[in-house]
């Protein structure tokens, strides 16, 4: 019953938006076929792509900006109509959401809206539409701004080819007023994307590969602090990132997001680094002096303190999610067993020895949870043979699965098995055996 009411409310919201769109188009002088097209595209995204409010806001804002730009271009006369960077809508959408269907819809809507305002026909709409498709295809998974420039050049080439195919008789007027502007149109679109991308990232709370690469730079203040204040945790994070990135690549998840999320997943250990084993290089274990209940508070607090640090340094929410979700609601087994061994169990509750969560909500955070657990368990092995590593990896992942830590992410059993195989491959390479070199004899030194 609750789902039914939610569905009704959502439907009312969509219908209301459609009504407002019709009124807007009527007073703006647009044909009413425009809102009908936008409406059905929105219905497709809403019911088949489960699009969230950020995507609808993105579509609405970009279309509104296009309407403004098209009207501004229109007021200057037909000489600059083809300079309108329609392809930038689809390119921005692909970079922000990495979704081919959404970028396809934006390429279509952008072409239709621009042509309605500028008074173009079907031919021009196809030119803009195909240019947008080409641009969005080229920038998929782009990691450098040079790729965006290449996409702009591709947009120009595709649009010029389309214009020439539509009208193969290239007289002077066509070259000046059509082919020349279209040749510059793609580059204009590329520069618009580069200039506007950071603004749209901030507005929609999304994170692109460009920002992820900036965050992966070791000169970031948080990573520099990790190197100095918690070197063991920093090294642990590097190993986890290697494991997690390889696993993400193996199942087709966002490998760059996983790598950067792994870099920052333990930043909360900066607050009390000496209470974590990997940073206890000289002194003994601090927890030997504490009660188990106090130890579990110190350990669990690194999650809360990590989130606070992430907000202080203004990390994107997609990165912040790795901090609480990389432990989920896992039990702090060592301290729980220590508490069981030390005294009466009447007031002892297992729930008190679990991390606050939430459980991983995405494939990426789930991979880091598994990589973090596997790395610690493997490092504790006395003998790093292939068989021992594989046994530990399978056991740890199986325990996390049984404990329900993977219940809220969309990993399949086949993907979990692929992740385990990837971990074994990377860890066995990390802990590979080495040849024992003979010691240099003293007689060799003196000769």
Image (tube, rainbow, N blue to C red):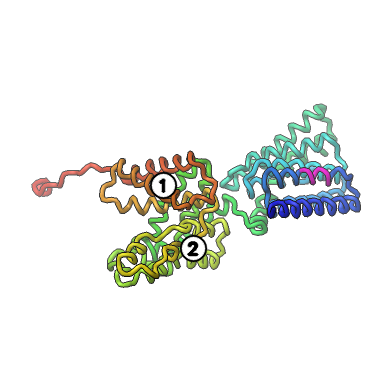
Of the numbered discs 2 and 1, the one sitting upstream in the chain is 2
Residue 189 visible, this angle = yes
Secondary structure type for disc 2: loop
> Would you say the magenta stretch is mainly helix, strand or loop?
helix
Residue 188 visible, this angle = no
Q: Residue at x 49, y 44 (%)?
A: 248
Q: Which residues are magenta?
A: 35-40
Rendered location of residue 216, percent (x, y) = 49, 54
Q: Left or right of 282: which side holds 7?
A: right
Task: Give the residue number, with chain letter if any, for mark 2.
Answer: 356
Q: Is residue 140 magenta?
A: no
- Vertical comparison of 169 with 398: above or below: above
Residue closest to the eye, 109 or 441: 109
Q: Residue at x 38, y 44 (%)?
A: 394
Q: Left or right of 372: which side holds 142?
A: right
Rendered location of residue 297, percent (x, y) = 42, 69
The dot on residue 398 is: 1
């Amino acid at each position: 019953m609750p789902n039914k009411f939610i569905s009704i409310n959502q439907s009312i919201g969509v219908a209301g938006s459609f009504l407002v769109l019709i009124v807007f188009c009527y007073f703006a002088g647009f044909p009413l076929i425009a809102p009908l097209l936008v409406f059905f595209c929105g219905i497709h995204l809403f019911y088949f792509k489960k699009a969230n409010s950020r995507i609808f806001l993105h579509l609405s804002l970009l279309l509104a900006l296009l309407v403004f730009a098209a009207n501004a271009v229109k007021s200057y006369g037909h000489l600059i109509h083809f300079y309108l960077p329609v392809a930038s809508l689809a390119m921005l959408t692909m970079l922000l959401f990495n979704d081919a269907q959404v970028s396809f819809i934006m390429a279509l809507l952008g072409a239709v809206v621009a042509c309605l305002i500028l008074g173009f026909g079907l031919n021009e709409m196809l030119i803009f539409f195909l240019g947008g498709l080409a641009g969005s295809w080229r920038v998929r998974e782009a990691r450098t701004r040079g790729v965006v420039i290449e996409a702009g050049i591709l947009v120009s080439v595709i649009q010029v080819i389309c214009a020439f195919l539509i009208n193969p008789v290239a007289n002077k007027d066509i070259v000046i007023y059509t082919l020349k502007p279209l040749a510059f149109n793609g580059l204009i679109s590329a520069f618009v994307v580069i200039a506007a991308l950071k603004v749209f990232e901030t507005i929609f709370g999304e994170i692109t590969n460009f920002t992820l690469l900036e965050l992966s730079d070791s000169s970031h203040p948080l990573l520099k602090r990790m190197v100095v204040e918690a070197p063991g945790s920093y090294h642990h994070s590097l190993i986890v990132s290697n494991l997690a990135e390889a696993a993400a690549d193996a199942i087709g998840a966002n490998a760059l997001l996983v790598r950067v999320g792994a870099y920052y997943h333990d930043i909360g250990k900066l607050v009390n680094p000496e209470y974590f084993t990997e940073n206890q290089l000289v002194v003994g274990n601090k927890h030997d002096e504490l009660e188990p209940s106090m130890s579990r508070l110190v350990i669990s607090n690194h999650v809360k303190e990590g989130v606070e640090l992430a907000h202080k340094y203004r990390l994107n929410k997609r990165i912040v999610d790795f901090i609480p979700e990389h432990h989920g609601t896992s039990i702090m087994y060592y301290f729980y067993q220590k508490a069981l061994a030390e005294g009466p169990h009447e007031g002892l509750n297992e729930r008190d020895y679990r991390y606050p969560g939430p459980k991983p909500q995405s494939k990426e955070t789930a991979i880091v949870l598994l990589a973090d657990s596997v790395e610690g368990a493997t490092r504790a092995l006395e003998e790093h043979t292939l068989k021992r590593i594989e046994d530990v990896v399978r056991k740890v992942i199986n325990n996390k699965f049984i404990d329900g830590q993977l219940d809220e992410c969309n990993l399949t059993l086949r993907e979990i098995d692929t992740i385990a195989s990837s971990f074994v491959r990377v860890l066995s390479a990390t802990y590979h055996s080495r040849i024992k070199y003979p010691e240099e004899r003293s007689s060799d030194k003196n000769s």
